[in-house]
Image: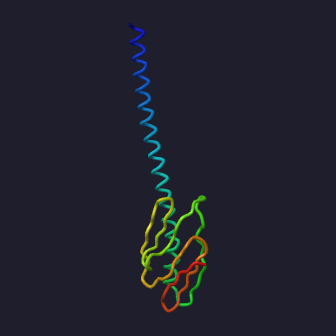
Amino acid sequence: MKAGQFAMEFVLLVAFMFIIFVGFFYIISNKVLEGKADANTQVAEDISQEVMNEIFMAKSVEDGYRREFMLPKKIDGAGYEAYIIENRELVVRFEGNEHVDFIPNGTFGNVSPGLNVINKSNGVVWLQRG
């Protein structure tokens, strides 16, 4: 009788410890995934900010301004998208995360990973792929 009770208590203890382990593993894996998603969002924001800085620089200088700038082709071996929608929104998508910035009026063209050219003529900022 006592050996049977001991076996039952042992099985219950092992089951309880397994449930604790699974719960702990679930919490840790969620925190890791949240951290990765936050890092991916930050990468998209950084790329967007780089383009926005170029646009604001071009808007603030005289006509005739021209500059080439590079956006990385890949980030940590992964590709991403960067483009402008209807000359209003700059969109950067990386690893399932999207960041959108609104570009100032009087800015036309598009950007992409790799070489880009920005210039200003007649008060209008033009972006084009290099």
Q: Residue at x 47, y 83 (%)?
A: 107
- Percent across and percent down for residue 113 are 57, 70
Q: Is residue 20 above or below residue 97?
A: above
* Residue at the farthest bottom position: 122
- Percent across and percent down for residue 21 are 45, 33
Q: Quadrant of the N terminus?
A: top left
Labels in figure, total: 0
- Percent across and percent down for residue 2 are 40, 8
Q: Residue at x 42, y 83 (%)?
A: 105
Q: Which colour scheme appears in the figure?
A: rainbow
Q: Quadrant of the C terminus?
A: bottom right
- Percent across and percent down for residue 74 are 59, 64
Q: Residue at x 48, y 47 (%)?
A: 32
Say whether residue 5 is left or right of residue 130: left
Q: Is residue 77 above or below residue 49?
A: above
Closer to the camera in the image, 46 or 76: 76
Q: Splitting the image into 4 quarters, where does residue 118 fall?
A: bottom right
